[in-house]
Amino acid sequence: FFSHLLTMRGHIPDEPTPSEQVLQVWQGFPEISRRLALAVVLGWLLSSLMPSLVSTLSLCPRNTFGLHLWNLVTYVLVETSLISALISGALVAMMGRLVEPIWGPQELMKFVGVITALTGVSTL
């Protein structure tokens, strides 16, 4: 009862709703980190809605060496389950939150691109 009266007078701020809390956490991540995490989740969504994209985007020596060189970068966007896509997206966002303020967005994108391509080449 008393807390309701104090809230009406403006002494106790209203607590944010769960969706507002999620939005605040999401906005706390740097821009490039958010985009990379979103790309991972959207990659899962696209590969789930259009299974033919999996062979186009995933890493397969027959395709990659057949002039599908984009596979060296796009294979990281192909996830097989929603849980793995969410975990990968969260890990990318958290890594970016630590690294992007130190290196800057351009260096982070260079790092992600080079590491992704080198991992793809070594996998083939």
Image (spheres, rainbow, N blue to C red):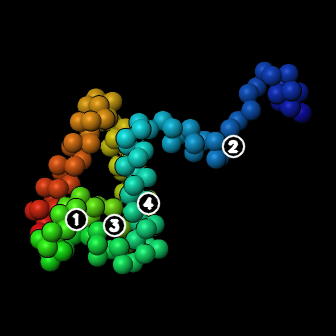
Residue 50's spot in the image, x, y percent?
Answer: 43, 75
- Residue 12 place in picture, x, y as percent: 76, 25
Q: Residues within 10 Å of mark 4 (few under 14, many from 20)?
A: some
**Which residue occupies the extreme front position in the image?**
67
Indicate the position of residue 66 as horizontal and vertical percent values.
14, 73
Which residue is depicted at the point 17% across and 63% down? Answer: 69
In this rendering, would 100 be left or right of 124? right
Name the residue that disc number 2 marks: 17
- Single out the mark in the foreground, 3 or 2: 3
Q: What whole-number distance in Å separates the C-alpha atoms at marks 4 and 3?
A: 9 Å
Query: What label sits on residue 42 in the rendered view?
Result: 4
Element class at badge 2: loop
Q: Which comes before the other along the chain, label 4 or label 3?
A: 4
Residue ID at (13%, 55%): 118
Q: Which residue is mark 3?
A: 78
Q: Earlier in the sequence, mark 4 or mark 1?
A: 4
